[in-house]
Image: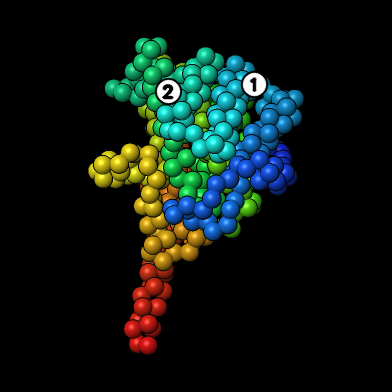
Amino acid sequence: MREYLLTAFIAAAITFLLTPLVRNWAMRSGAYIGIRDRDMHTVITPRWGGLAMWISMSITFLIVSHLPLTGQAFGREAQGIFLAGTFIMVLGMLDDRFDLDSITKFAGQALAAGILLLHGVQILWLPINGILTLPANIGQILTVIFVMTVINAVNFIDGLDGLATGIVAICGTAFFAFSYVLAVVNGFNRAGAPSLITAVVIGMCMGFLPHNFHPARIFMGDSGAMFLGLLLAASAITLTGQIDVNAISDSASRSALLPLLLPFTILGIPLLDLIMAIVRRLRAGRSPFASDRQHLHHRLLDLGNSHRRTTFILYLWSATFAFPTVIAAFAPLWVALLVAAAIASLSAILIIDTLRAKAAQKREVAHV
């Protein structure tokens, strides 16, 4: 555990120090766009935050590869995740600078998933009627779909200063806890790529957040959102490959069935926002990837919440999905439900407080 904490700390420190340098370069390179109607910021802000994260990941890998535990996590899968992450980050940088079309980005995301496949990062089974071992071609198709779904879920939620950064940090923390505790409880090797990658993700997000929280001085852009989404998806898939399918078939443990289901619950808020946006736009006869101002964060802002409060509420909603799911894998269900209720109650209190303040303000205006 100490080596993973050190890994997260190194990634955070490097990201924090590099981000101002990347910000200056992004401004000089024109990696920004003008203020659009749907944008929440009022000052031109550079992108390319993903570049700072990628450099941080690269340097962190070089350092921790020499440690006794984390050094064992480097293998074919870790190499594939690094190469795929590099490709998707460069694609995101090009999009941040030249605003690529959706088809080009989807093709690039599929190609990044293909890089993962070439390095053995693939969905091998599904928890259907026990354990269903997948034919190779079906597993490859599902892997590409899974990776692209997670990438776009993270990308869609990136609409407020610090929102995607904080949510990915929460998701990464929950997933790291699950993968590490699963290894401890079941006697798996603790030096796994999932724990290593998620520790780096947590560190990168924590180092980037001070620069990205409202008012943001730099955005992660597609270079960061797609990069982080790919890392989360690859970590989930890699974890399933480290689990003995025969052992799962004979196990009554709830944790045995969670590795592939966990990302969907941990990323519950981004995925919900993604699904709602697609349905909403298709009903309106628009492209599912056309922009609008009806995302979850827009609706919370319309209720009267401040920028920071809206971000914090969505952090709590994400935590409501993420942490109870992990707890339910290793503790009684009532404990998980109690934690979920406590977190959800806090977010409800914040929303109710905002509505009361808004109602009081209307009454004061009416009296005037």
Q: Along the line of sight, which residue is nearer the eye, 304 or 75?
A: 304
Q: Position of residue 44 (x, y in %)?
A: 58, 53
Q: How many numbered markers are drawn?
A: 2
Q: Along the line of sight, which residue is nearer the eye, 162 or 174?
A: 162
The span from disc 2 to disc 1 (Cα, nearest Å) is 23 Å
Q: Along the line of sight, which residue is nearer the eye, 52 or 67?
A: 52
* Residue linked to disc 1: 74
Q: Position of residue 194 (x, y in %)?
A: 55, 28
Note whether residue 188 is visible.
Answer: yes
Q: Along the line of sight, which residue is nearer the eye, 157 or 349?
A: 157
* Residue linked to disc 2: 144
Q: Residue at x 37, y 42 (%)?
A: 290
First in sequence, mark 2 or 1: give its number: 1
Q: How is the image coloured?
A: rainbow
Q: Residue at x 48, y 18 (%)?
A: 114
Q: Residue at x 48, y 64 (%)?
A: 306
Q: Position of residue 324 (x, y in %)?
A: 43, 45
What's under tag 2, amino acid-wise?
Val
Q: Position of residue 297 (x, y in %)?
A: 42, 54
- Residue at the outermost top position: 136
Work out whether 279 lies above or below 297: above
Note whether residue 263 is visible.
Answer: no
